[in-house]
Amino acid sequence: MPESTQDTNLPYAIRAYSAERLRDALKKMYLVRKFEEGAEDSYMRGLIHGTMHLSIGQEASAIGSTMGLTDEDKITSTHRGHGHCVGKGADLGKMFAEFFGKETGYCKGRGGSMHIADPSKGNLGANGIVGGGLPIAVGAALSAKRLGTGAVTVCFFGDGANNEGAFHEALNMAAVWKLPVVFVCENNKYGMSTSTERSTAVKNIAERAAAYAMPGVTVDGNDFSAVTEAVDAAVARARAGDGPSLVENVTYRWRGHSKSDRNRYRTKDEINEWMGRDPIPAMAKLLMDHHIVTEDDVAAIEAEAEGIIKDAIEFATSGPDPKVEEVIRDVYTPEATA
Amino acid sequence: MNAQNKPELRELSYAEAIREAMDIALEDDPSVLLMGEDIGVYGGAFQVTGDLVDKYGTDRVLDTPISELGGAGVAVGAALTGLKPIFEFQFSDFAALAMEQIVNQAAKVRFMLGGSVSVPLVMRFPAGSGTGAAAQHSQSIEAWLGHVPGLKVVQPSTPEDAKGLLLAAVADPDPVMIFEHKILYKMKGHVPEGYYTTPIGKAAVRRAGKDVTIVATSIMVHKAMETAEKLSADGIDAEVIDLRTVRPMDRDTVLDSVRKTGRLVCVYEGVKTLGVGAEISAMVAESDAFDFLDAPIVRLGGAECPIPYNPELEKAVVPQVPDISAAVRDVVQGRV
């Protein structure tokens, strides 16, 4: 949770978080980037067979949006969810092991990239269905309210999901029941190949909050401080019992939708322009400008992240494969089938 | 059993039995809540929740907006995080609006997450024809959900089982789908007092017999029983099995019966093709019980059309006592 406030001329993140937390956030952004680069490299070298959805370029949104959460708070995530897992404190080794389909992975090799979850840290899981997590997040918020846990649920979804019926049903119910949930739309401008201009009747997805009588705000999703400021305010509102909010982080995925994407729906210029707005150097600069880290510190943090990824891949590749004869083990809860 | 000598044998309707089960579940466990459309002051479209809202309040008998997909998803999310929702669909047909959450989420999340979570969710589906509500309010879709690993699917046919299976479903850590036949809601029968469970995955032999096995589900159990009584006058001794659970199916009870009688007739209201009877038949055909068959297996199921409005047509598209009677006679007398 945010800790301190001093000079209001400082950017929000600098005011709200300790130097240690901010350095950790920068490290997590590197971890997301390097996890996904490692995943892509493994795929290219034929080491894994499944698909993946990379969030490279969106790291400020994932790490900024989870900055103010505790382990008791919940998240629901999306098919592009590696960053959300890291933000919620996932172990990189278990993430990679899942990616490699190992018994030592988060889902014991049953889920893969699209279903990584860590319920012990409040991560209810990525989701392969666009919009699938939206009502589930509302259910988690209903539990928090009924059971009086004080937990807040952050529900990640993409611009594509905002045209699913589940989005509208979920926002409406969250508002009617005044539930502690924050809807975080990561608007990376394309639902697969279809741009928001071609798919969505409103200019900003946050405008849709008005239809459900909740606050809606659009922020630069590549600006870590702007993301934390908006999401922390929404989390505080939810925690105070004042109900849900919608935050739209405008960002961009550098890579294609998935491995089948030939990038025929957008221009090289557009991709290059967004690559020039890389959220990670921007975060490093923010911390350097405020004397939280030096250039050498940044290099050391990046190197530390690289080391963690190297160890994670080592852990993953050396882990056991799941046993074929145990494939149906987790369909039902054991005591129930006895 | 002679009810006159046992005045303690209390009778409730099927709907009252379900309500009593929900009342017990709400009373016993603060994490249980009811969700659904118009289940509060209205009492539910079929008055199954009745006045429970007066006793437990609107937080625990929670009226949802008309949002089947969202409502089902909220129930899944709540089940993942410490609550035990009992979610009522107004009509089973409306499950079509919520299949994403039932099939892709509730059924799969435990498996996809490597067993790190369970989804203790109960869904209730008022099902079946006979009310003149036509094609979108009369289906029997238990086979759709029975096809999905991760779900359990039950079809109580009596008030006693309606209560016992619901309490078993609430106690179960996995998602249990309960198909309640609307025509049975007013049917009365003996219901034990207090807490008890009817085991999920166990069929019941409703009538012992030696000549032919009739495996029936839901309301068809009663039609099969009526048929069996009629046929006994003609010297045909039918065994009637109430399947009770579609998934997981009670293989032993069905196979033991077929080994004994050597003849099998399946009776169910869902569309015949690819329905529950297909699975029962295949189960027998793939087992040693096949060697005991003295006649081909016969299935009686719903016609290959949506449920029509006109009452005569509506009756004609699902098995009736004369249809069952004719089929059983044919099987027993070697005319198949």
Image (cartoon, coloured by chain):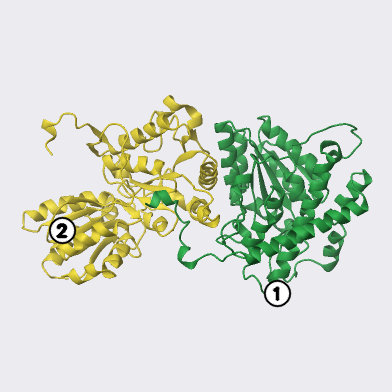
- In front of the other: A72 or A146: A72
Q: Amino acid at mark 2?
A: Ser
What residue is pinned by disc 2?
A: B325
Q: Secondary structure at mark 1?
A: loop
The answer to whether residue B36 of the structure is visible from this angle is: no
Check whether the beta carbons of the residues at disc 2 and disc 1 lie within 8 A of each other: no
Q: Residue furthest top?
A: B54
Q: In which image quadrant can residue B27 be found?
A: top left
- In front of the other: A303 or A170: A303
Q: Position of residue A309 (x, y in %)?
A: 74, 60
Name the image quarter holding the N terminus of chain A: top right
Q: CA distance from mark 2 to mark 1?
A: 66 Å
Q: Residue at x 80, y 43 (%)?
A: A21
Label 1 Cα neighbours within 10 Å, binned few <14 / some 14-19 / many ≥20: few
Q: Position of residue A116 (x, y in %)?
A: 62, 55
Q: Amino acid at mark 1?
A: Arg
Chain of the residue where label 1 is placed in the rendered structure: A
Q: Secondary structure at mark 2?
A: helix
Q: Position of residue B298 (x, y in %)?
A: 23, 66
Give the color of chain B as drawn: yellow
> Left or right: where does residue B269 sit relative to residue B81?
left
Nearest to the eye among marks 2 and 1: give it.
1
| Chain identifier for the green-coloured part of the image | A
Number of the label disc, if any, that sits on residue A45: 1
Q: Residue at x 92, y 48 (%)?
A: A288
